[in-house]
Image (cartoon, rainbow, N blue to C red):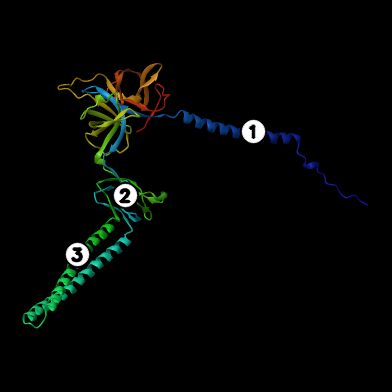
Amino acid sequence: MAESPKADLSSLRIAEHKRGAARTGRRIGILLAILFVVLVLGGAYFAYTHRAPAVQVATVDAPGAGPPALLNASGYVTPQRRATVAAKITGRVVGVYFTEGMRVQKGFVLARLDDSDAQKQLAAAIADRNATRAGILDLQVQLQNARVDLRRARLLLAAGVQTQQNLDNARMAVNSLQARIDYARAEVLAGNARIQEARQAVENCVIRAPFAGIVVSKDAQVGEMVSPISAGGGFTRTGIATIVDMNSNEIEVDVNENYIARVKPKQPVTAVLDAYPGWKIPCRVRTIIPTADREKATVKVRIAFDRLDPRILPDMGVKVTFYRRPRRGETKPLAGVLVPAAAVRRQGGQAVVFLVQGGRVARRAVKLGGRDGANARILAGLSPGDRVVVGGPANLRDGEAVAVRP
């Protein structure tokens, strides 16, 4: 019997030299992929670490003429007139007619409450008053007839036909009808008062702006309940909107009680908003609140702007400098120049600033002459008009390229 043929698998075996070549190819591919990733990451890191840092600059100012600074303080812009407008009654909001940032005039309708119940009470009061008026007309007709009967009774009594009792009854009927008419007229007056009360209830469903200003907060939406009494466990609003009179903005600062003697009414003040460090705003002391805070040992001082500006917003942080009142003929210019205090840095025990020139920074050693409010006085090293760095990385280097941000 012939044997069945056997499969020869030796032909499928991979030669040893070919197997090594395949392994070597895979290793090279993995190494190339790793090298590519390293190059990409290295390039990204190089680009990130060597990009020009962004800085904020300010222009050096000459201090000009004027009296020296007496005192520095910080505070906030606060409006004299700020109101959270609320409803006089409890009700459900059915209409809101304002948005945040909207300028409104006095009497502008901010919102409306559901007045269906108040309207029904008004209609009922008017109906009661009209019914009473109609009753007066009937009584007046009866009174005319009673007066005719009274005249007839007098004539008959004079002729001896009727008795005195009939005359007295006729007179009593006239007086009774007159009294009922007077009472009805009083009821009409009371009905008019009830109508006015009902109309006021309807008017209370309309929330109006108490003064001209800008809406800074929207506190209620359509469908919510509002109440002037309490928040009702968090489900009832107590206010509709918050309105600020921008024309009443002023500055409120706390002055240490040890230095309050240096502050006088109408004293000149320079204010610098934290949002605009290069903008000096002329002001005057408006009033000194005659009480001290025992916990902070400070006295509150209110400062009025000489001229308001739309950039001045409530609750902005501000730094102020109080100056001595200028004496007559005092025009001697102060020495040095002024830069924001943030521009001065300390390196190696020396005061330095970084000037921005042609897209690069230049390190410049300066001589300080003290503080002038939010600014530092530089006696040497800078000139008016120089541009200095007031905000940026702390590790700036001389000659480094920078990008100036607004």
User: Are circles 1 and 3 on residues that touch, CB within 8 Å?
Assistant: no
Read off the residue under disc 1: 28
Element marked by disc 3 = helix
Give the amino acid type for the residue marked by disc 2 in the picture: Ala
Read off the residue under disc 2: 86
Read off the residue under disc 3: 186
Residue for point 32% across, 62% down: 117
- Closer to the chain start, of discs 2 and 1, is 1
- Closer to the chain start, of discs 1 and 3, is 1
Q: Position of residue 315 (x, y in %)?
A: 32, 37
Residue for point 85% across, 47% down: 6
Give the amino acid type for the residue marked by disc 3 in the picture: Ala
**Local crowd at mark 3 within 10 Å, few (<14), some, or many (≥20)?**
few
The answer to whether residue 311 is seen in the rendering is no
Residue for point 25% across, 61% down: 194
Element marked by disc 1 = helix
